[in-house]
Image: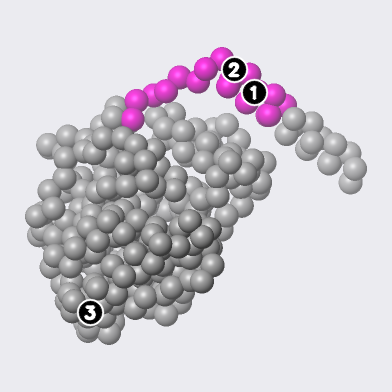
Amino acid sequence: MRPPETANSRPPVVIFAYRRPDHLRRTLAALAANDGASETHVILHSDGPRSTADAAAVNAVRKVAQEAAASGAFAGLEIVAHDWNKGLAANIVDGVTAAMAAHGRAIVVEDDIVTARGFLDFMRAGLDRFEGDPRVWHISGWIYDIDPAGLPDYALWQVMNCWGWASWADRWQHYGAEPDRILNEWDDATRRRFNLDGAENFFKHIEQNVCGQKRTWACFWYATIFEHQGLCLTPTRGFAQNIGLDGTGENCVSQGLPPFDESARFAGFPAEIDECAEMVRRIRRTLGVRPERPVMRHLKRMERSLRRIKKRIAGQAR
């Protein structure tokens, strides 16, 4: 059992920001309105400018952070200002790793995540509830736009969502970004399970990292959880919303936002929280099964054939 929380033992909120001061202002304002915000320590990682053209926006972000630190809304707000541009993935991985090493667990928010009033209470309660449960690796604050009627308030499932999340150091220590290994080792059945039985193409993010099209982190955290057969706790009514789907984000395209109640509070967990097949069915319907185009099927068959040939050649060389 973890001892009762004190102001110093509560998990910190780690925020990652780059060059969107207006988004960060909304993120910090929503977090400050959370129950328990005044007892929460915040660590804000501000990435450095990629070029001189970004310097003004980065400086504006740091001014917003300094204003939030001076406001007294949080127990403390530490600003980690990087002189160079680490990039989103490296900034997050390094920052989360440092927070986990120092505190054993952490809540993570990017600069375009607006949280409901009960977000911090939900995250802290989830970290306490499942810390000793090796099945659970991740806590998500966001959920797909599904009808929650008739569903439990909270459920466990395989997919990781990173729009407001939390985890523990003993799970995060297994994180690794190994796109080439995954591409070579995962067969079609494994990839299909990873893709929620074809409802979404999560695996494409692994492939995009292999070819250099993207440099991301979240797909590898999901892959880590997936390979360890871990589960993720999720609310069926979200405590977080991404406001960065307006074309300003590093890796997200513009799209509409699902309904979101910023006043939603956390009322506690039920006695039992389990996997919910009906929730998964609704998510799969929301995502929709996307049929592969013939050219993509042909390219994937060629890729599988090349992998088999490489394995045979490697076996003959031994």
Position of residue 144 in the picture relative to residue 259 (left or right)? right
| Mark 2, residue position | 295
Q: Is residue 316 magenta?
A: no
Position of residue 33 in the picture relative to residue 256 (left or right)? left
Residue at 89% over, 39% down: 316
Residue at 52% over, 17% down: 293
Q: Marks 2 and 1: CB-CB under 8 Å?
A: yes
Position of residue 14 in the picture relative to residue 314 (left or right)? left
Q: How many marks?
A: 3
Residue at 17% over, 34% down: 147
Q: CA distance from mark 2 to mark 1?
A: 6 Å
| Mark 1, residue position | 299
Residue 102 percent location from the top left of the image: 42, 80
User: Mark 2 falls on what kind of element?
Assistant: helix
Quadrant including the N terminus: bottom left
Q: Which residues are magenta?
A: 287-305
